[in-house]
Structures are given as C-alpha cells and as structure tokens.
Amino acid sequence: MPQLLEQWRLKSADGISIEFLTLWFLGDIANLAGSVWAGLLPEVILLAVWFCFTDGMVIVSYVYYTWIYPKNIKARSSTASGENEALLPGESTNGRRPSHKSHRSHRSRRSSIVSVIMEPSKQTVFVKFVLPLLFVTGAGFMGYLLSSPDSDPVDEIPDVELRLGPQVLGYISAFLYLTARLPQIYQNWSKKSCKGLSILFFIFSTFGNVTYALQILFYRSDSKYILINLSWLLGSLGTIFEDAFIFVQFYMYKDSESDEAIEDEA
C-alpha cells in the first residue's frame, strides 16, 4: 500500500523496477500455491493471498502510470490549450474567474490527513514511520485477541508430511524472492536515486518477513517441521538481507533526492 500511495502521489512509477515487480509477483504466486499444497498455517496462507492481491494492485498502478496516464495527460493538455486560446487572462474555461473557495479548500486539504501522503517530506518521523508501524502492530495484536486460541498442545498437532510438489514450489518461490530485489538494487544504483520508491514499503516488507518467519518458528521448532518450512524461511529471511541494501541506498542517495525536490519547488 505505501508504494501504491507513492505512485499516486507522484503520478509516476519510474522509481520501481518492473523486473522487481514481475519476479516478486511470480514468487508470491508460487508461495501461495506451495503453502496451500503443503497445508501450512492458515495465517501463512492468508498472508500469501494478501501478498498476491497487493502485487497485482502495484503492477496495475505501474501499467497505468507508465502507459495510460501520460497519454491521458497529453490528450487533456492539447484539448485545454485549444480552449484557453480564446480566454481572457484570469478567466476559466466557463468564462468565470477562479473562486477563492478553491484556495480555502486547498488549504483545508493540506491540513488534513491527505497532506501526510502528498507532502511526506514535511512530516515528522513519528507520523511517517512510527505511527504506521504502531497501527499495523496494533491491528495484528487485535487480530490475535479476536482469533480463537489453539488449545491443543504441540504434541497433539497432527504430523505433517514432507511432499515433493510443495517443496519444489517453495524453493522456486524462495529463488524468485531472492532474485527479485536485484533489478531494483541495480536500478537505484544506476540512477543514483531512490525517488519514486516508498521507504515505508520496504520497512513493512522487512517487518512482515520477520513476523512471517517468527510465526513459523514459534509454532513448532522440531527439525522435521523446520525442514518442511525451510524454503519459506529462506525466502522471507533472505529478502531481509537484501532489503538492508536498499535501506543503505535510501541513505546514500538522500542528498540527490533533496536536490531534485528543491529544483521541483523552484
């Protein structure tokens, strides 16, 4: 969701790599199929479904802002330029001067929650990062409290079978996850910029992968269960290591992004 909001704010998807999105989406599909086939925890399966849904939304947003939106803007600009040629200075297309109400509504909009999205650089660290993380943590805790507790002891949990099909899908998913970040890391390095990427997106990704792995490890810790879930653990924990590189890039290229923001305001 943070990346969707970032692309909507900038009206552009230039910052994110389509190769990253494609490999990531394929990895989530393999992850979902493998987790369902292997009969993993319901929470793991639901999370995999959510990952596929959000991947699809980001890809649709990428397609829209890369190919469809620029064409619409170009068509509107050509139409508006033809209409404005006959207008007097200060008049709008309906022959009236702009109302001051628009300025008041503009100010009220900037004082609302939309300003947090539209002007993230002017927000505090608490508003940009801490508050969303607290919200996600609180939502997860509430979900845990509302869910029915499992009263069965670990020893009575039915034994799980190590099957070839789910394992193959799991390791394919892990491979796709581990390679998906590489095009994005390369694109950031080649552009010397992370503009268009939401750092909150990668923070949530890291937070989600940590909790994803912990829920598997805390559920059972015997060697057979760990072996069955090893591919999913490799995929989640491995991406944390790669996300660390992207966090470093955010820090390295922050000055160039600040310069671009100053030029845009000028």
Image (spheres, rainbow, N blue to C red):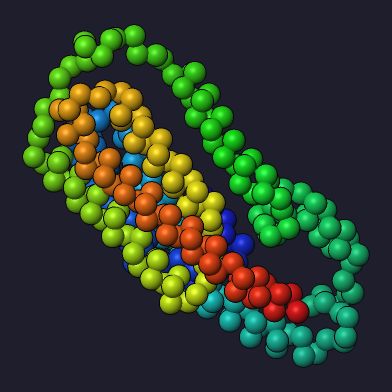
Relative depth, front residue between 43 and 121: 121
Q: Position of residue 186 (x, y in %)?
A: 38, 71
Q: Is residue 135 left or right of residue 265?
A: left
Is 153 rendered above or below residue 258? above
Is 162 rendered above or below residue 59? above
Q: Residue at x 61, y 46 (%)?
A: 129
Q: Is residue 104 left or right of residue 192?
A: right
Q: Position of residue 203 (x, y in %)?
A: 50, 48
Relative depth, front residue between 207 and 35: 207
The residue positioned farthest toward the bottom in the image shown: 85
Q: Residue at x 24, y 49 (%)?
A: 173
Task: Using the rendered image of the protein, determine whether residue 176 is visible from the camera's viewpoint.
Answer: yes
Is 26 rendered above or below residue 261? above
Q: Is residue 72 left or right of residue 80?
A: left
Based on the displayed image, in which of its 4 quarters is residue 11 positioned?
Answer: bottom right
Based on the displayed image, in which of its 4 quarters is residue 91 positioned?
Answer: bottom right
The residue positioned farthest toward the left in the image shown: 164
Q: Is residue 60 left or right of residue 257?
A: left
Q: Residue at x 89, y 74 (%)?
A: 97
Q: Residue at x 71, y 75 (%)?
A: 262
Q: Position of residue 252 (x, y in %)?
A: 53, 67
Q: Quadrant of the C terminus?
A: bottom right
Q: Position of residue 102 (x, y in %)?
A: 84, 63
Q: How many marks?
A: 0
Task: Using the rendered image of the protein, determine whether residue 63 is visible from the camera's viewpoint.
Answer: no
